[in-house]
Image (cartoon, helix red, strand yellow):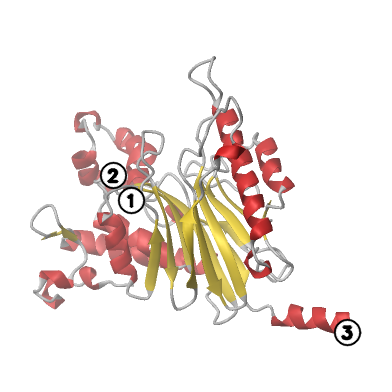
Amino acid sequence: MWYTDLRPDEELNTNRYFLVMLDKYDDYARLLDNEGKERTIKGLLKLKEGLLNNIPSKGVDKNLLLASWNIKNFGRLKDRTAESLFYIAEIINAFDIVALQEINGDLDHFDKVMKLLGSDWKYTISDVTEGNAGNEERFGFIYDSRRVTHSGLSGELVIPDEFISANPIIKQLKRTPTFTGFESGWKKFSIVSLHLHPGDGTNDPDEPTDKEIRKEEVRLLMQLLELKLNRSSFEERNLIVLGDTNLYEEDEDIVQLMNDKGFFESDGLKGKYTNTSLNQIYDRIFLHVDQYFKIGEDEDGQERGGVFKLFDYVYKNTPDAILKYHELMLIHKDDPSTLTSDEAFRTYFNRYWKRNQISDHLPVWLEIETDSTQSFLQNKLNALE
């Protein structure tokens, strides 16, 4: 991580291009004053402690930490502060590969996060999905090149015409999923990142419901992935589907469509709430992998995976924490005259402001074992005996 912007002014190089947090829209003015630096450093220290206590350590040639995170309108929300970008980068830095959803057209904030992460971090990114339904969204993968390499495989998943029925509910997924290959140790695998149709109702009784649209997206996607898996060479059949699925607890029939094609969730993530309100299981990771592709386990034999509850460490829902951001909330709110009491500030802070600073989704993650030598050799020994 690159923390130079957080140094006191007297320690900083006077060359402004030495810094990351500069406002390109205002003659590259600095985005952090001393008060902001102090607040950010304190937040980073708490965030580091939370990551250390909740995310496994990175072991050389032992494990791979995979995460998926929908960062709300990343690039479109212009009021994100430099402080928030530091927190986003710090969380990404705790993993090896992070699949991002909802990256928008403007990449200024994305570029700042990449600079904070440093030169060892690389990325792949898709073009925006055009049209209103696509919401100008991109998919991205950020990965630590010291721990994982891009295999060279990268593309988008487009539903072929022959899969489309005579009177289709949809012809393509609303946001075109990406398909990217990676390698780490013994592991060679591909990841599909997706963002399915949201909602649990319908605006028109003559139109399909949100769930019907989402179910058809999954059905078409599974049909396409089945075709690709059958064509792939053996070593490329490890496939992970992840992202913001917008699946509700009652969408078990949609999950079953994925299970029927051999995609299953890790026990470490199954049933865990992933949105900021902690009442929905939107963000999922499904695996279709061979016998040597193992999820890491803790000392009790439980698969390692979970949801990182970042708001337990930064932008906490406490009076003292909220008070620190009163001034910024007054600047960012369209009608600041409504913020007339501590309760009004608290409501706005929790419902909107902190979600616009970071996200309305929490990162989900899995630990993958990258050293399969023991199980591989034991398997071959059993075959010889």
Give the residue number, with chain letter if any, for mark 2.
77
Res. 55 in view: no
| Position of residue 33 measured from the top left corner of the image (x, y, whole percent) | 16, 60
Residue at the spot 27% in from the left edge and 71% down from the top edge: 3
Residue type pointed to by label 3: Leu
How far is disc 3 from disc 2 in space, using C-alphas? 60 Å
> What is the quadrant of the C terminus in the image?
bottom right
Q: Identify the residue at horizontal 54%, vertical 24% (top origin).
A: 201
Question: Can you name the residue that lies furthest to the front here?
Answer: 162
Q: Judge depth for marks 2 and 1 and give the one in front.
A: 2
Determine the image quadrant of residue 279.
top right
Nearer the observer, 59 or 181 = 181
- In the depicted structure, whether residue 62 falls above or below residue 86: below
Q: Residue 321 got which mark?
A: 1
For marks 3 and 2, give the one nearer the viewer. Answer: 3
Structural crowding at the residue carrying mark 1, measured as other residues with C-alpha within 10 Å and reported as few (<14), some (14–19) or many (≥20)? few
Q: Is residue 173 left or right of residue 238?
A: left
- Apparent side of residue 234 relative to residue 175 in the rendered image (left or right): right
The quadrant the N terminus occupies is: bottom left
Q: Give the mark toward the camera: 1 or 3.
A: 3
- Could you tell me residue 335's position as x and y percent? 21, 30
Give the secondary structure at mark 1. helix
- Residue underneath mark 3: 384
**Sequence-first tag of 3 and 2:** 2
Residue 302: where, in percent of width, then height? Answer: 70, 63
Relative to 13, residue 368 above or below: above
What is the distance, in whole Å, between disc 2 and disc 1 at their CAs?
A: 22 Å
Q: Amino acid at mark 2?
A: Leu
- Kindly identify the residue that appears in the image at 35 percent across and 38 percent down: 352
Q: Earlier in the sequence, mark 2 or mark 1?
A: 2
Q: Earlier in the sequence, mark 1 or mark 3?
A: 1
Residue placed furthest toward the right: 385
